[in-house]
Amino acid sequence: MKYIMSLLLALAVVPGLRLEAKAPAPVGKEIVLSSGTGRIYVSLPEAGRADGRAVVLCPGGRYGYLELQSEGFDWVGYLNSMGCAAIVLRYTMPAGDPSKPVRDAEEAVALVRRHASEWGIRPDAVGIFGFSAGGHLASYVATNSRGEARPDFQCLFYPVVTMDSSYTHMPSRNNLIGPRATAADVRRYSNELNVDSTSPRAFIVANEDDVKVPARHQLFPRPDGQRRAGRAPRLSHGGPRLGLRRAVCLPPPAHGRARGMARQPLRPAAAACLRAPLRQRHVALPAPLARRAMGVAPACRL
């Protein structure tokens, strides 16, 4: 036993090695995606509470694993209590092929729309939530996908957005497009460069003490080279932004301590995003959240 414990302690300090805990128990009806490795888990609210909205949840994990519990299943009960259908996505790891997770995410959004009548969902009220690397996947689908695979709104929590090596989270970038990525791949998967006037609104939440994906990742300079603290970037070349005019930078919990993130302070942000009329471009943050936000006015542009 002593030798086993010594081995476990040694493994625990090996850089880059992650010892996975027991797999979380799935919540909701499981549907296998066409990839064979991707899954969605569908949880519908009570009939009398449903408001017709649905959210596909993309957990993070630097494109190397998935935080299915804290950034997936832990959100189901809360979203259902708000009348929103919750669809947790277990997407395929890229393993050198970035199209794998993208195909799963696009199919998940499309499947929700195809089952809209059966599940009591409005086809024009299907959104996507993404956390960390899952935020990159969510914003990629929102800015690049078309037709029934494109969500109507996006809510991004401490997301990886760009593949620009000056700002990106390098473990996520390396797992997605590889350490020797071409300039074309960097361009294609830098979501801030793919925004146009049709891009769905985005609500972006960052943590001011995040050391893994710092808030500056969402606040990189505008095309004119200027930077404004507390403001979201212009996420296109002088055109429309990815969504929020200003990012919401919150105090702890920081990135990586997101276990239980379905609790405060992210729930009010999610609620503000969900309760806003789909066509509305401005959303008023709850007063307590607005007071805690860094450099953010109570009314934020979505």
Image (tube, helix red, strand yellow):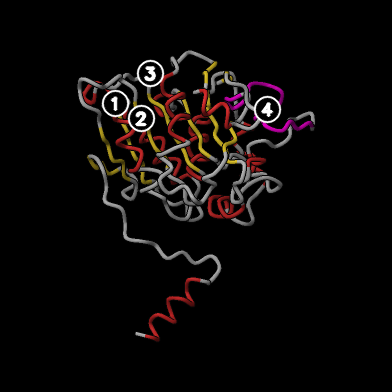
Query: Which mark is drawn over residue 114?
Result: 1
Q: State which quarter of the image contains the N terminus.
A: bottom left
Q: Quadrant of the C terminus?
A: top right
Q: Which residue is mark 3?
A: 124
Q: Secondary structure at mark 3?
A: loop
SS state under label 1: helix
Task: Decide if residue 149 is on the left or right side of residue 14.
Answer: left
Disc nearer the start of the sequence (3/2): 2
Q: Nearer the viewer, mark 3 or mark 4?
A: 4
Give the mark toward the camera: 3 or 1.
Answer: 3
Q: Which residue sits at x=67%, y=40%?
A: 216
Q: CA distance from mark 2 to mark 4?
A: 29 Å
Category of crowding for the residue at label 3, using alpha-carbon neighbours closer than 10 angstroms: few (below 14), some (14–19), many (at least 20): some
As measured in the structure, the alpha-carbon distance from the residue carrying label 3 to the one carrying label 4 is 26 Å
Residue 195, how many percent across, how many down?
60, 27
- How far from the left and from the top, in percent, is residue 243? 57, 25
Task: Give the residue type that dot 3 points to.
Answer: Asp
